[in-house]
Amino acid sequence: MSKVFAVIMAGGSGTRFWPASRAKRPKQLLPLLGAADAETMLGATVRRLAPLIEPDSVYVVTGRPLVDASRAALPGVPAAQILAEPAARNTAPCIAWASATIARTDPDAVLAVLPADHHIEDEAAFRDVLGRAIASARAGRVTTIGVVPTRAETGYGYIEVGADVEGGAKEVARFVEKPDKARAEAFFTGKKHLWNAGMFFFRAKDMLALVRAHLPELADGVAKIDEAARAGREEAALEEIFPTLPRVSIDHGVMEKAPGLAVVPGSFGWNDVGSWQSAWELAPKDAHGNALPEGAIALEASSNIVKLLGNSHKTVALLGVSDLIVVDTGDALLVMPRERAQDVRDVVDALTKADRSDVL
Amino acid sequence: MSKVFAVIMAGGSGTRFWPASRAKRPKQLLPLLGAADAETMLGATVRRLAPLIEPDSVYVVTGRPLVDASRAALPGVPAAQILAEPAARNTAPCIAWASATIARTDPDAVLAVLPADHHIEDEAAFRDVLGRAIASARAGRVTTIGVVPTRAETGYGYIEVGADVEGGAKEVARFVEKPDKARAEAFFTGKKHLWNAGMFFFRAKDMLALVRAHLPELADGVAKIDEAARAGREEAALEEIFPTLPRVSIDHGVMEKAPGLAVVPGSFGWNDVGSWQSAWELAPKDAHGNALPEGAIALEASSNIVKLLGNSHKTVALLGVSDLIVVDTGDALLVMPRERAQDVRDVVDALTKADRSDVL
């Protein structure tokens, strides 16, 4: 049976977790949901794949400045399988390049492409769904996982499901952009729409064929890199060609155009951990809804999240405050209301304008 | 003309500025109103006396654990003039002991007793009032300074003034406890009441006579210490006797009972800096009322105070929050509303109950 590889997309440089996340320490390299010394989200992503996919069958695609930190977070993953993009070009070039790399030795290999920075509550249920998606991909169908909605969420893209196919999978009727509230309500009650969690499964050769069909310019570029790699000079070709590849997502560039896609529905407590608000939602909380470091004092304080990074022995005291985000990283301190979690971008923008790359 | 000495009462172990203030670093040893590397309040107290009283004529009375830090804050004050109390017994024993100590060499010396942790905006005006109070004391009247009220404050004690005496001083009609709001309003409009700022001026021998008259037990104890000091064995006597002296304030024990007191009214921007609220009031603020460290980012944030101690290069970002106190000392972080500044005691109590002497 053909081999299965995980390809972890770990290039994100999210600013939504500033000051915890930085250019050189993005979200996936943080222990966002645990104590300061807990495992990174990237580490958790790889750990929970076993025994379905062991670390020596994991590839990670990341940016060059993050290679060392990614290796440190993943001691079980062979160093040569941490692929460094010379430039960030969105997900289609990333996936096409990884597919070509694995196809060089095994075109029939099945790839499980997974984001590096999501949270999964029920890991056993996740592996079960993962197994079905891999089986579907092995049978020659490009397959995705669709998360069964638990609320009328407007922040995610959706997948409309069609007829049943074998093995618990369904046909993908279409991909749907983030809906407004009314449509999200309709999706939630209609039960024909799943959340697009950005997880894709396919044989390496199938993805390369799809890229050739829908993104020929990308296919040409990746073919040149592949040719150079076969001749033992991938580095130079990568440096020259990768930054010129079309900047396009796998969703828009391939998935939304390709026919015959399958989706495996799943319920495993998924969360994309998109903001400090989701970090609060996922964190263990005291009786008053506070997610606090150990030893913190909270008096008449409710529904706050306080996160310490790099100084976990600090004593935190809250009195008479509610619904705040407080993040302390040693060199930076953020205080804002939870309901404005998305607006941390404005802080990052202000720091960028003030030339404060020292804390970005 | 008899010599003038300042006696700075620097024994306070206030908890109202936690986490900045600690048992071993109380308020007077903090740069509460400036940058993290600004002068301490004790340092400012001594600095602003010159040229009226130079540092070599300054005595400081403090607790033993604070002697080293007090010396470090006051390089110009002779080390032998930093007097260490073996135990805190309130202000009457402190002042009686300092008076006896100075009277040993110069019973006619004039003492200016001043708190170590108050803020004075107009230092030249203060020195002018100080000069008048010293002159009044030199003429044999025990004298205090009364601050002309700028509002109907309920948080201070008051001094009711009587007839004029020479040199701009007035008779003290009586000392008045902290009033309720209605009385405070009446005091403010009546213009016959001044704030008691806890500053006292007298000849050493006059204070010793008052203590003998009104607190004979204290006078006996201090006489024994003085006798031992004359025999070159003050340390042992201090250790034995000082902790047994009556625990009483100079206000209740002497001033409220003594006849013929004078008060010099003054307006010099006085503030006893009693809480983080007063620290905010006194601090330089941006256009939105925020008192922030240099380089801080404040977006849609107003009337907050953020104080960093021991980590002054930290980048602070506030977004969408108002009227907060945020204090970060490296080992502790406090967040609370400004209007609840007094309740920081509750945090200190909770930490005490939790046996957290490491941060107290």
Image (spheres, coloured by chain):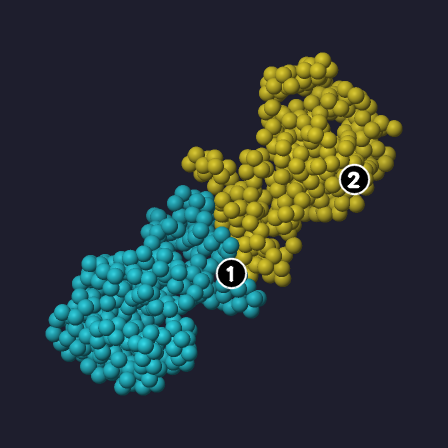
Chain colours: A cyan, B yellow
Confirm whether residue A183 shows in the render: no
Above or below — where is A6 with respect to B24?
A: below
Please state the chain letter of the residue tagged with numbered disc 1 in the rendered image. A
Q: Are marks 1 and 2 in contact (CB under 8 Å)?
A: no
Q: What element carries label 1?
A: helix
Q: Residue at x 51, y 46 (%)?
A: B330
- Tag 1 residue: A359
Position of residue B188 relative to residue A167, above or below, is above
Residue A335 seen in this snapshot? yes
Foreground residue, A227 or B94? A227
- Image: B359 above or below A235: above
| Residue type at tag 2 | Ala
Which mark's residue is nearer the viewer, 1 or 2?
1
Q: Residue B50 carries which label?
A: 2
Q: Could you tell me residue A320's position as x and y percent?
A: 46, 49
Q: Nearer the viewer, residue A277 or A44?
A: A44
Residue type at mark 1 is: Val
- Circle 2 — which element? loop
Where residue B150 appears, x then y in whole percent?
A: 70, 47
Disc 1/disc 2 C-alpha distance (Å)? 43 Å
Where does the image place residue A104, in percent across and percent down from the top left?
25, 75
Specify the farthest residue to the left.
A166
